[in-house]
Image (spheres, rainbow, N blue to C red):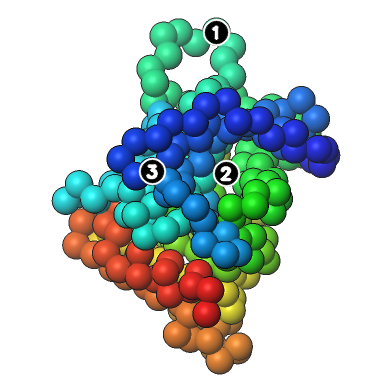
Amino acid sequence: MEACPLEPRRLESVENGGRVREKMLIQTEPGVLMPFFAFRPSGSPPKGGWPVLIMPHGHGPGKEAPGTVSASGLDFTEELVGAGFVVLRPDARGSGERREWTQREPRSPGECSHREINQMAIGLGLSLAGMMCWDLMRLVDYISLRDDCDASRVGCGGMSGGGMQSLWLGALDQRIRCTVTSGYYYGFKGALLELPHNCACNYVPGLWESFDVGDFGALAAPRPLLVETGSRDPLNGPGGLANVLPHVETARRAYSLYGAEDRLEHRVFEGGHEWNGSGVLAFVERWLSDA
Ligand SMILES: [Zn+2]
């Protein structure tokens, strides 16, 4: 991967109902462009800037729908902007406006080209998950260029594929102050390697010989991490919660080394592969406050 000037461009700015949606474009590698939405409150930012939550999307129509609307209809982006946050929602490689196609037609809005990109990446010693993580790190770089954002108060959160991207970013980028991962935290060997129909973006050659999801959670320590799990989520694998809880304990041991057990929260709700969101705003507000 090769760094380059971000060259940010604002393509559009639309104000509606007390919030502004900007459509932005940055360059994450030479010639590789990433469009994203920046949602912010209308009006002036506080001294020092607004805190920021990066919200990668799961599988579906990309940045248009991050998958973080609860069953009761609560939209987490709207909640955050209403609470005084900036929310960044990028298109991941192979999703939304960044889909790359060979011969396949027709293309539904929710279809992605993750498999096509990942199999090319593997041949080059790369992985799509790594590319996604790189792009999100460049988005963190971009935040420091904005006068209206506080680059010292940046978190990330997402559901399903967005939970994957959030956990990887939170584990690997120390600038992320808190992380929310939903619908993704389960033992890889007891889930991904049992469920071959999962999308190709989940698979990194050789990684699971040495790592499992609890190690990703441990890498985030001692920075706050909230793990959300649906009790009946089929992606937990055939073992269900028994394929989740031991991996939370792996991460908890790392947090305990720092005396930071209170910074790891695991919320299990009655439900399937869905965003619940209960208590997530309070968690983000707590850890991204300017106190
Ligand atoms: Zn995928």
Q: Contact, CB < 8 Å: mark 2 with mark 1? A: no
| Residue ID at (43%, 39%) | 20
Residue 270 x, y percent position in the rendering: 19, 62
In the displayed orientation, state which residue is furthest to the bottom: 259
Q: Nearer the viewer, residue 168 or 233?
A: 168
Image quarter in which the N terminus is found: top right
Which residue in the protein does label 3 denote? 19
Q: What residue type is labelled 2?
A: Tyr
Q: How far apart are marks 1 and 3 (CA)?
A: 40 Å
Q: How packed is label 3: few (under 14 Cα within 10 Å), some, or many (20 or more)?
A: some
The label number, if any, that marks residue 204 in the structure image: none
Residue 113 x, y percent position in the rendering: 53, 25
| Residue ID at (43%, 75%) | 286
Q: What residue type is labelled 3?
A: Arg
Is residue 205 visible to the viewer in this orientation of the structure? no
Comparing labels 1 and 3, the label whose residue is closer to the camera: 3
Q: Does the residue labelled 2 lie within 8 Å of ligand 1?
A: no
Q: Contact, CB < 8 Å: mark 1 with mark 3? A: no
Question: Which element is circle 1 on?
Answer: loop
Residue 201 x, y percent position in the rendering: 55, 39
Which residue in the protein does label 1 denote? 103
- State whether residue 14 is above or below residue 261: above
Residue 116 x, y percent position in the rendering: 59, 24
Q: How packed is label 2: few (under 14 Cα within 10 Å), some, or many (20 or more)?
A: some
Q: Nearer the viewer, residue 19 or 180?
A: 19
Among the two numbered marks 3 and 2 on one chain, the one whose residue lies closer to the N terminus:
3
Question: Which element is circle 3 on?
Answer: strand
The label number, if any, that marks residue 203 in the structure image: 2
Q: What residue type is labelled 1?
A: Gln
| Residue ID at (57%, 44%) | 203
